Structure formats: structure tokens, C-alpha cells
């Protein structure tokens, strides 16, 4: 081996050694970077999982809250339906009273609503024929000095009466009285029905 071959062999050996060292260093850096990214990926995965669990928890809470609200609305609707049914039944029972009791009820209503004792009593067409004369007779007997009269006019109502004094009318129809009574007694009736 002459001098040039020795120098070339030495350069080649040094270059291979340097390349091997650079390659080892690059592999070590790559391994360190891979490890760093593994740690970051694991941390991000844990954070994403925790975030996902939290989001799922919030969604479950929203759904539960919505379900509770819906259940309350449904319960309220059922209670309203029961109240409606109770007041509808009360009106039907009033309308189904025997003639004498029905006339007495209307007479008491007329006396209670009367201001002057000289008003006209207006009934629906059915009640005018059925108990009209009895109502006036009983009402005048209940209130001293009363001179209530029966009008030949009728009103559209399920039952009850209207008192008229000139241009002033007092609506004592069952549907009106029950609506007012319902507004006043809804809490009491609900307490009885749902206690």
C-alpha cells in the first residue's frame, strides 16, 4: 500500500466512523423525539378522554334536566285535565238537579246578585220553560221587598241566569260562575285532588 492508498483508506475509515457516529446520534435523537411525542400523545389522549367524559357528563345532565322538565309539564297537563274534569262534572251535576232544587239554586243566585230587588231574570230557553216561574217566585220569597220579574228573553248559556236592571246586566251563568270559582279555588281543589 502506498501513501495515497493509506491516506484514502484512512479517510474512508474516518468517514465511516464519523457517519456511524452521526447515524447513532441521529437515531438517539429520533428515539428521544419519538419518546417525547409518545408522552405528548398520551397526555393529549388523557386530556381528550377527560374532556370527552366531562362533555358526556354535561350532556347527560342536560338530557336529565330536559326529561325532568318534560315530566313536570306532563304532570301539570294531567292535573289541569283533572281540574277541568272536576269543574265540568260540577256543572253537569248542577244542570242535572231536580226541578225544585234547581229553581231554589237559581233563586238564591238571583237574590245574591240582586242590587235593587227589581231586576229582570233572564234564563236559557230550556230553563225558562222548565223552572222560570218557580225561580221568580222563590227569589221574591227569599228577599223581602223584592219584585224580581221573569223576562221573556233568553240567553245562550248552559245554565244559571242573567240579571238585568235597565242597561246593566249581571252574568250569573254557571260557566261564568264556575270559571271565577275555579280561579279562586284552583289551589284548594288541586290540594284535595292530588294530596
Image (cartoon, helix red, strand yellow):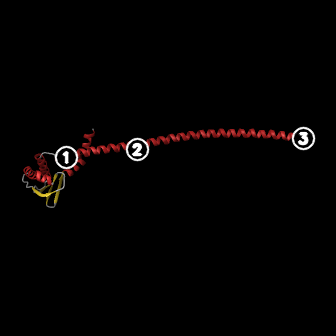
Q: Which residue is mark 1?
A: 92
**Residue 124 appears in which quarter of the rendering?**
bottom left
Mark 1 crowd level (few <14, some 14–19, many ≥20, 10 Å Cα): some
Q: Which residue is mark 2?
A: 66
Q: Position of residue 123 (x, y in %)?
A: 14, 54
Of circles 2 and 1, which is in front?
1
- Secondary structure at numbered mark 3: helix
Q: Residue at x 34, y 44 (%)?
A: 74
Q: Quadrant of the C terminus?
A: top left
- Secondary structure at numbered mark 1: helix
- Secondary structure at numbered mark 2: helix
Q: Position of residue 27 (x, y in %)?
A: 72, 39
Which sits earlier in the primary sequence, circle 2 or circle 1?
2
**Looking at the picture, does residue 30 appear above or below residue 135?**
above
96 displayed left or right of 12: left
Q: Which residue is mark 3?
A: 5
Mark 3 crowd level (few <14, some 14–19, many ≥20, 10 Å Cα): few
Q: Residue at x 16, y 59 (%)?
A: 168
Amino acid at each position: 500500500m502506498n501513501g495515497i492508498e493509506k491516506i484514502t483508506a484512512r479517510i474512508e475509515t474516518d468517514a465511516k466512523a464519523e457517519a456511524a457516529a452521526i447515524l447513532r446520534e441521529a437515531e438517539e435523537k429520533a428515539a428521544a423525539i419519538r419518546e417525547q411525542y409518545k408522552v405528548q400523545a398520551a397526555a393529549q389522549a388523557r386530556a381528550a378522554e377527560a374532556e370527552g367524559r366531562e362533555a358526556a357528563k354535561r350532556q347527560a345532565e342536560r338530557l336529565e334536566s330536559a326529561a325532568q322538565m318534560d315530566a313536570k309539564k306532563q304532570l301539570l297537563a294531567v292535573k289541569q285535565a283533572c281540574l277541568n274534569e272536576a269543574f265540568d262534572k260540577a256543572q253537569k251535576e248542577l244542570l242535572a238537579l231536580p226541578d225544585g232544587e234547581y229553581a231554589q239554586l237559581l233563586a238564591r243566585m238571583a237574590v245574591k246578585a240582586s242590587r235593587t230587588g227589581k231586576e229582570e231574570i233572564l234564563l236559557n230557553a230550556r230553563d225558562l220553560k222548565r223552572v222560570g216561574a218557580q225561580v221568580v217566585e222563590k227569589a221574591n220569597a227569599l228577599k223581602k221587598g223584592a219584585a224580581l220579574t221573569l223576562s221573556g228573553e233568553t240567553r245562550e248559556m248552559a245554565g244559571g241566569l242573567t240579571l238585568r236592571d235597565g242597561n246593566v246586566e249581571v252574568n250569573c251563568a254557571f260557566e261564568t260562575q264556575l270559571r271565577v270559582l275555579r280561579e279562586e279555588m284552583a289551589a284548594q281543589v288541586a290540594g284535595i285532588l292530588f294530596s
